[in-house]
């Protein structure tokens, strides 16, 4: 596979991957510094944007799945689509954050909340797995004081008609020890298209975990993966989230709701499983970074047809 780099006018940087043969999807990325956005396309059509500025946290939005279906809720970044609820305005596309970090709430969006600020512009690298976006962030209190740093590696790619986002984040307590607190409000999350919801207008979704839990019974339980699927006019589509075996407290606990929030959260043990308050606390020590790895798979077919269990196993042992 050959990698190419080209420069276009102004501040736009375009990188793309040449496929091994004509059937392989072509993944491209373009940096727009003015809009603080990286546009990622697959075969010339929009897949997702990394919005790295102008928000309290970096977000991936929109996300296009099989048959051009938008996999995430439009609101509040865009006007609400039919059937979308205007709740939880901090639920935007796909994101990583947490609700209690040294007592600072980075989950909500408010004047007293923390912010995750990307430093500089993302680095874009093409490769055999797709396009990789690399960023460095500072987690700040409302007054701008630093709480910790992070570095994020996002790989966007395709497997046939399916699309994936591999999200790896390394958290570093370079400003002093940091406690990630025991709360359900976190952490690696997506807010789905209401079609995939389990309740509400237009909801047609079903959900299952690696442990065989379904629907609301998944909430707060441990699982290596969860998968939400729904029928469309052209067939079933779904979104699965994979938790890597190297992650803290794998298999993780899930803040997986019936209204469209899907979040892997290894910290919320008191809320999820009624363990003693603070049981989910994690002390991030200075000079001892924590790396967390996830895959989001936007797939055609139901859980069995898409072979989610087998694909989690392949992904979890591939690197």
Image (tube, grey):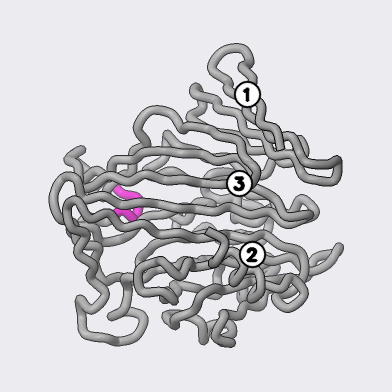
State the CA–CA distance, disc 1 to disc 2: 31 Å
How crowded is the residue under tag 2: few (<14 C-alpha within 10 Å), some, or many (20+)? many
**9 w.r.t. 283: above or below:** above
Q: Which residue is drawn at 60% across and 50% down?
A: 74
Q: Residue 239 carries which label?
A: 2
Front-most of residues 85 and 121: 121
Q: Is residue 80 magenta?
A: no
Which stretch appears magenta?
A: 106-110
Front-most of residues 231 and 295: 295
How crowded is the residue under tag 1: few (<14 C-alpha within 10 Å), some, or many (20+)? few
Q: Residue 52 carries which label?
A: none
Q: In this view, does 261 lie to the left or right of 8?
A: left
* Secondary structure type for disc 2: strand
Q: Name the residue beneath numbered marker 1.
A: 5
Q: Name the residue beneath numbered marker 3.
A: 156
Please provide percent x and percent y for residue 197. 62, 70
């Amino acid at each position: 596979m050959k990698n190419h780099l080209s420069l276009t006018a102004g501040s736009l940087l375009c990188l793309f991957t040449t496929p091994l043969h004509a059937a392989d999807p072509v993944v491209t990325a373009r940096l727009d510094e003015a809009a603080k956005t990286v546009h990622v396309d697959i075969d010339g059509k929009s897949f997702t944007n990394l919005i790295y500025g102008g928000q309290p946290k970096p977000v991936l939005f929109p996300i296009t799945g099989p048959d051009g279906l938008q996999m995430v809720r439009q609101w509040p970044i865009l006007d609400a689509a039919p059937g979308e609820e205007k709740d939880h305005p901090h639920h935007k596309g796909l994101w990583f954050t947490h609700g209690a970090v040294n007592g600072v709430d980075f989950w909500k969006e408010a004047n007293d909340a923390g912010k995750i600020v990307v430093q500089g512009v993302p680095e874009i690298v093409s490769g055999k797995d797709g396009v990789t976006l690399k960023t460095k962030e500072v987690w700040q209190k409302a007054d701008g004081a630093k709480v910790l740093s992070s570095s994020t590696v996002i790989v966007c790619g395709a497997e046939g008609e399916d699309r994936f986002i591999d999200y790896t984040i390394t958290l570093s307590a370079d400003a002093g020890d940091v406690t990630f607190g025991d709360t359900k409000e976190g952490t690696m999350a997506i807010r789905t298209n209401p079609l995939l919801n389990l309740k509400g207008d237009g909801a047609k979704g079903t959900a299952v975990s690696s442990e065989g839990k379904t629907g609301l019974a998944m909430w707060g339980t441990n699982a290596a993966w969860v998968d939400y699927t729904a029928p469309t006019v052209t067939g079933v589509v779904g979104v699965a989230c994979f938790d890597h075996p190297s992650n803290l407290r794998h298999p993780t606990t899930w803040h997986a709701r019936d209204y469209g929030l899907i979040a892997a959260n290894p910290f919320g043990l008191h809320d999820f499983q009624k363990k003693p308050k603070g049981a989910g606390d994690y002390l991030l020590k200075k000079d001892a970074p924590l790396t967390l790895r996830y895959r989001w798979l936007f797939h055609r077919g139901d859980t069995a047809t898409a072979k989610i269990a087998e694909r989690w196993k392949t992904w979890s042992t591939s690197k």
